[in-house]
Amino acid sequence: MIFPEIKSPTLLINKEKVDRNIKFMVKKAQKYNLQFRPHFKTHQSAEIGKWFRSHGVKQITVSSVKMAEYFAQNGWDDITIAFPLNIRELNNVIKLTKKIKLNVLISSVLAAKYFAANMKENISYFIKIDAGYGRAGIIPEKIKEIEQIIQTCNKNKSTTFKGFLSHFGNSYHAKNKNEVLKIYQSSKERLIKLKNHFLPSFPHLILSIGDTPSSTLSNDFQEIDEIRPGNFVYYDLMQHFIAVCTLDKIAVALACPVVDIYPERLELLVYGGAVHLSKEYTLDKQGNKVFGQMVTLNKTGWQIPDEQMYVSSISQEHGIVSVSPDFIKSVKIGDLIGILPVHSCLTADLMRQNGGVMYC
Amino acid sequence: MIFPEIKSPTLLINKEKVDRNIKFMVKKAQKYNLQFRPHFKTHQSAEIGKWFRSHGVKQITVSSVKMAEYFAQNGWDDITIAFPLNIRELNNVIKLTKKIKLNVLISSVLAAKYFAANMKENISYFIKIDAGYGRAGIIPEKIKEIEQIIQTCNKNKSTTFKGFLSHFGNSYHAKNKNEVLKIYQSSKERLIKLKNHFLPSFPHLILSIGDTPSSTLSNDFQEIDEIRPGNFVYYDLMQHFIAVCTLDKIAVALACPVVDIYPERLELLVYGGAVHLSKEYTLDKQGNKVFGQMVTLNKTGWQIPDEQMYVSSISQEHGIVSVSPDFIKSVKIGDLIGILPVHSCLTADLMRQNGGVMYC
């Protein structure tokens, strides 16, 4: 029996693949002379943090104050919280600034006013720029508003302007490599103009970008100072579908017990559902919803079968896997199959809480 | 400041609404002389369990062995695990049968063989019937296969056939009340035929059904013995969209801090994302994706505003809320807004782990 210790859905983390993914991005940052501040929201794990540290990483990004507190407790002392400052957590932020080097985000003039009025400890801030994603931050052409943010924050002498931070989240909705690079180029150009406008007054300002699709695919980082990709540590099916990674680079697979087999429907029922994988899906070329791609497990990990088999529907604890006629003949109740997740950040978050994690 | 103790996304549970929802279903079961075995997968909470107990509930349903273990530790001694038997957890199941009255599900002849070969303690089983949903179980017209399941299990004298269990999960995809009732009627008729076929040989067999949409809307439970709804304890937006509940019956709202305000886009950025609400969405009449509906908070809970405002996009920790011109004038950074979840089962599961829960 493969992995006899696994009774319920368990996230397998392949150390070799994780290491290779980290090494790739560390080298890329070195090659282009970029500060590398990986986003730890994907793994949220002190253990994986140690693996990053063994590759020389010393600065990190997180997406919540809680995550910053967790990693500060685990020895990380230079953290950017890449989420607009939540003033309800101001006391927690103030406590953290006493322990570690902390950067926060200011995303509007309104937010700057609250920040300047309430911040009491030395803290650096980035201005969050919306270079096309449309989620959070200020548009790079709004120079006057950006100046107003800096002036507003300047009234509080404990705050230091560090630079501009942007996340090209729209690259996740790209359909292929060209679309990713197009989004990257146009967003980057807008940011570089902004940087050049402020550089004379702030010669040390940092331009920080770096979603996983662009950081992986681009080879043009001129005038960029820092990258903050996160998802690349595990990659996932979504990244594979836009050709950001090959399937063999995906470093996590959810091991799921087979609980029933339906030969007539060519389907397996597995223990593994929305509380393990999340409800995130992607569409395959035929327009089918794909909640994960099946892999076969072996003694030391998993392998990608020749035929594409996938999770076709999902509920709270149930997963339905569409399989090939050959596979359905060989599989048995009680076997384990693996599922490459659509969105590894959400799956890792769920499995950190709802189940187990195993290194292989 | 409303709820000054809330710093980060927190699930508000309105005890009065929960109580009313429980009372409604308890009374309905009494009226139609049904055994009531509510599904506890929605709340997964010992505390909410106590509220059920105060209404006289003594038998429950769960969807995993872990959940059965948790509720057994919290004093529940009659539990159905409404998930096909996972033989990798057989030792845990055997341990549980020594402590409490446990029912498990058998969903195919193949599964029956494993069950009969491996079960060592006295245990009752339901046969899982697929009456149209197409997820798990055996089709009710396959009388021979069902007989074969019973015969197979019979070889192991520690097993007792208890009856047929079905979940009309397809009712969740209905668009309105009529569609729910149509699914309910046609599925029920197929099950009643099955019941009547086996009743002469098994005069005590139980027919157990009861998703939240049909249990709420139907008034025809003839020949049904047991209902197992779960979601009704909180209800949610999905149930509201198919007219199963009014908005004021939804008993949970995610309290989210407002971190930024974008008057030009008529949008708020709130701290509250996919790791709190889940990625589940529903479509409104205009075809917009809705990840949650906004409510305003007051000192003791929430109220439904006249204008419909909703979460229009979501990422790991961020939520974007589309609001009205009037509301955007009144809201301030640091305020809290409430979000009625699309799928309360998934939101409650996430908040049990990823954040806090507060009763109001």
Image (tube, coloured by chain):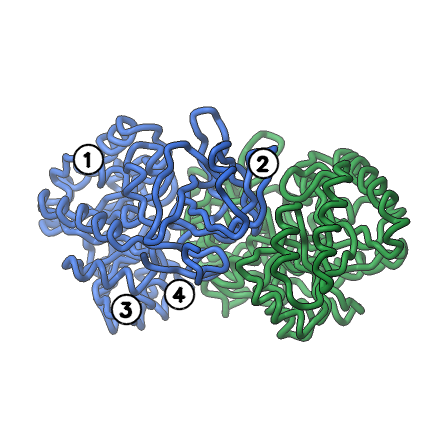
Chain colours: A green, B blue
Residue located beneath label 4 in the image: B89
Q: Earlier in the sequence, mark 1 or mark 4?
A: 4
Q: What's the residue at 80%, 69% (across, down)?
A: A56
Report how far apart the C-alphas of labels 4 and 2 lie in the structure: 54 Å
- Position of A139 with respect to B333 (left or right) is right
Amino acid type, label 2: Pro
Q: Position of residue A34 (x, y in %)?
A: 85, 56
User: Do tag 1 and tag 2 residues touch (Cβ < 8 Å)?
Assistant: no
Q: Earlier in the sequence, mark 1 or mark 3?
A: 3
Q: Position of residue B145 (x, y in %)?
A: 29, 44
Along the line of sight, the residue nearer the viewer: A180 or B141: A180
Amino acid type, label 3: Ala
Amino acid type, label 1: Ser
Residue located beneath label 2 in the image: B263
Residue located beneath label 3 in the image: B72
Q: Which label sits on residue A42? A: none
- Position of B223 with respect to B184 (left or right) is left
Q: What's the residue at 26%, 36% (across, down)?
A: B141
Q: Earlier in the sequence, mark 3 or mark 2?
A: 3
Secondary structure state at the residue bearing disc 3: helix
* Same chain assignment for discs 1 and 4: yes
